[in-house]
Image (cartoon, coloured by chain):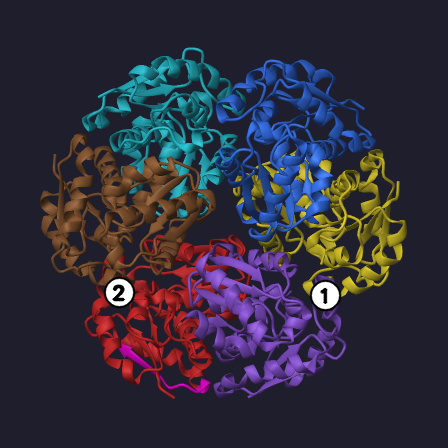
Chain colours: A cyan, B brown, C red, D purple, E yellow, F blue
């Protein structure tokens, strides 16, 4: 079986390592999973310009892997270049944002999103609108943490739990999505604290891509 | 790994055999897949009353399997009893209609549905509305075949191609869903004839259920 | 004039008596209204499994009444079996949830729902989505009362008023729906306290069914 | 019981007579129904300017009747002045367009509208959007008849049947609304020809108003 | 170049003077802008009846100006008579509410509305629904000020800032609309205090009307 | 007044010349309009990969012009890089697709889109969904012309008229959008042939950008 390549379009090897660890339970699904770092990417992707500028080097990286690949996941919540890559390769290509949403739709009735920065939320709304799922959105709320706090695992979890409680109790979410590729280690602690299923988008992306590979999907009309 | 049980809630062993064949490519995903027939079900499920009346015996069958099960798929396009079963067991429970829609959302922008009977379409609309995906629906059209024609493979395929062409060319579908559990053998021929990905709902249901099992989801709040 | 049968699908005769009292003002509309208890139902319907399991005995009860009936109302907020019953009888069949919503749509611009349990809200959302009215929904909030509190009329009213104020002031509701068949005695007190019209779903269901009977509607295509 | 006043805001006594005849089956509902003609209205209301200019004299007429009235129906598909009248009187005030839609929502899953003029359709879309029911709309199609044809009953029915067939077979309607106050005599013939329930908006308006009167609704917050 | 007439449909010359001042930056766009007061209008428009009753005299005023006009703006948030006027004249006719929304759609992803009175909000919802933009609405909140407070500039600004903060921080608005024709003087102070673009609806209406005039649009089909 | 730069992100100077001609009537609006060709762009933009790959050089071009610019229009229907550019400059940045839609919303109730290629339509749907305007969309249909036909003005106009008639008569459009930057010369002929307003997206983009410049909008929160 050809491998699934999970491309982290930022240049942080720590983030890639976190994604790789999150893939562990999915390695039983019969497909090798290889996580890659986009060296030319920025250390972190915080706005649409940074996201869009990863597309050209990401396409080059993926096209270089195309012969040996079974499928691709683009591991940035925002799905930069996902549709462009579908024009360039014939394998399944999955974005982690759309995968997280598709997964959440089958785990609850209204999803809440835990975002890091308030400025990401309008971008998420645009994507959820493009996916046509605004009626399933309970809310999207930012952690409101500074950089120093984010380095502190206890404070980050605390903020995520508080954010999740608000999404659950005020906004009516019955499933949560972590709106960022680098939060995987908090998934089970959040689920325990909140009593709700939590979708880690890289896991959702890989599971969905493997399913598409097994069912034999490839290039779609939409890719033209 | 505990098996995934795919329950056909009608009593037709021929339909179950067709579902079982459709599972073949998904058997590489690390989970045994067992297809079951609901003996107390009707020969075919053609309206909401027939669908609702399968729920009680289907729950009994599934509860009897619960100890040995890794997950459940209810294999009737209409998802009868899916939410009831989520109240009764703690494993992932997936309906093939919602799975087909979630899968189609990631393969194209607007999905078309090929239904057997015109009378099923309002029920589908209700479900798509409940899923909040009406803006992604291109159209839902019936084959308009009589029972005699359905027994004839050539005529059925012809009618499916004609229906798919209308969904693609007039309604703007770029991915199709087969709106019935018993159409699996036509999937690849339809894809070739139409140049669009075609979602077979039992496959979509099993792939999604296995993904949920691997990621470790179980009972959700929605099940209460 | 043949009577309208209002079937309470739980087994509580106290709830049925409350429904019967709520029918009083509608008995001037030219149609006898008879309230029935489903003996085989559970004492209360609190999740989808309990709701679905009422369908088979409810259908049997209704089919036994069909010859003498002018119409049917299924008096559980959740409308279990309403569409199944439309397949079985030719008279108008109305669910109290869809009737409450249709009534609220003509009394205000955005409706708020007062629910007893938080776990019911995702089910309501699914129904409101199926009805295509999510843009008219201001919010759906639970009373957050324990069983002991619910037995206490003063505390229940207090919680309902608090819930209604939040729906009115934070969520923007200008009409309220009581999301349960057993709250009729609070309707006028709530209206006075909040200055908003309040829809009692059993009343809404019976008024709508009588209107359909008078206009001569019966079996619809949707029932097939 | 105080009467329900059904006000025809055009000056055609023939249209008023047609509305009065359509009220016949609803006269068993315990409320006297009186149909009135707005003498200052135009002979027919064909655009938004004509509709808006009926509001001032309609308000004057209704306010003159307010002391003796139990409720009001404004019988023009377009609901001119309905919300203004709610500011002026404390009784239930119902527009026939919103009543027809609310009624259709409980008789089928997707409604089709038979309009007389193509130019009315954008106005209807605005109203259906304001009601938040666009996902329930199958289609709105015009008869495409000239004035001479409309005077001819056979040709009008033929055109209505053709229009209804297109709404049913191409657009997927399972319930139809007659998009005009003057089509009542065709309702039953259309239902027979098409096998679908057909909503006559004046009947829907009166049935809904009587229901509101019986349940004791009056002025709503929305009227301020 | 023929002038753009901006008609204030209330009788307050102070409001008209405020609108006139707000037009200042748009006077560089190559079209003379003339602000008019509707003498027969009420001192303020606070409900739908008052709004509807301005239509007849507003139409008379506009029709008297039609020969010399290049275009019209109706300067009441609620757009009374906008569609009626499109039936009566062939020039571009713009309502400030729809113009404010169209402008906000291009300045942010979700708009918040600052309203004066709570009772206006259901009317706004109806309009936003008619415009089909409910998924872009973050929230609509009222200032909650009494008349005495509104006369006090400092208190009004303070209330607007508090309202805007709630729309931004709780509801997720990234662009604000002032839901009234008379708030222009607060626009820049609000933008500074909140860090968000603020749409003043009269400016939005005039800019949009001038654009339509330059591009040569006139009577549309919708006007029939 | 600083100029508005209209950037054609493909490398065709013929297309740029066509855009420049279309700007003529807008040059009276008090702002110089300069049309630029992106030399590094492809000869035509026909899929998402080609669109995304224009972003980096387009940003470089625009950033080089930023000091002397009053505003920017990105003149490709698809709006590539519009949100990225908003992160990089503080002036108004307008995409012609969102501008065409915002303009159409004020000229009719349901817009139809005339596209060149069928494969563009799913991309348009995603954008219209992101804009939250799917309920205002009547339809999006492709011309179905080959390259040879497109070079032939008569055949192109004929195909556009046929496409527009279908959008108007079958889909219910009352305003049309030309879904491509290079169709400006056909606008008035289409309007005459169809009796509907037709939006040329480059004109709509420039008019909207000039309005934003005059009203003093710049960087929005959404740009972060």
Q: Is residue C199 above or below residue F84?
A: below
| Image location (x, y in percent) of residue F157 | 66, 37
Q: Which residues are magenta?
A: C28-37
Q: Are marks 1 and 2 on the same chain?
A: no
User: Residue D222's mark?
Assistant: none
Q: Residue furthest top?
A: A39
| SS under mark 2 | helix
- Residue D117 seen by the camera: yes
Q: Is residue A147 left or right of residue E63?
A: left
Q: Which mark is residue B49?
A: 2
Name the image quarter holding the N terminus of chain C: bottom left
E38 sits left or right of A5 in the view: right
Left or right: where F138 falls relative to A159: right
Residue D52 marker: 1
As helix, strand or loop, the secondary structure at mark 1 comes to: helix
Compared to residue F169, the image places residue A57 above or below, namely above
Between F134 and F24, the residue placed more toward the observer is F24
Question: In the picture, residue D69 is in which quadrant?
Answer: bottom right
Verify whether residue F144 appears in magenta. no
Between residue F172 and residue F93, name the one nearer to us.
F172
- Within 10 Å of the Cα at label 2, are there few (<14), some (14-19), or many (20+) other Cα atoms? many
């Amino acid at each position: 079986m050809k491998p699934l390549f999970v491309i982290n379009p930022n240049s942080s090897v720590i983030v890639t390592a976190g994604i790789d660890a999150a893939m562990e339970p999915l390695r039983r699904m019969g497909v090798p999973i290889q996580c890659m770092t986009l060296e030319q990417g920025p250390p972190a992707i915080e706005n649409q310009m940074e996201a869009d500028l990863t597309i050209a080097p990401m396409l080059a990286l993926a096209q270089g892997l195309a012969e040996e690949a079974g499928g691709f996941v683009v591991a940035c919540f925002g799905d930069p270049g996902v549709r462009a890559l579908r024009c360039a390769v014939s394998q399944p290509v999955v974005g982690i944002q759309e995968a997280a949403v598709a997964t959440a739709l089958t785990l609850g009735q209204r999803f809440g999103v835990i975002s890091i920065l308030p400025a990401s939320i309008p971008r998420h709304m645009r994507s959820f609108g493009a996916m046509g799922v605004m009626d399933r959105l309970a809310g999207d709320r930012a952690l409101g943490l500074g950089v120093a706090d984010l380095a502190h695992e206890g404070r980050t979890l605390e903020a995520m739990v508080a954010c999740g409680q608000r999404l659950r109790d005020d906004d009516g979410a019955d499933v949560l999505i972590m709106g960022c590729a680098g939060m995987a280690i908090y998934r089970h602690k959040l689920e325990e604290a909140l009593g709700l299923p939590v979708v880690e988008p890289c896991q959702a992306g890989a599971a969905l891509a493997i399913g598409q590979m097994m069912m034999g999907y490839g290039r779609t009309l939409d890719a033209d």
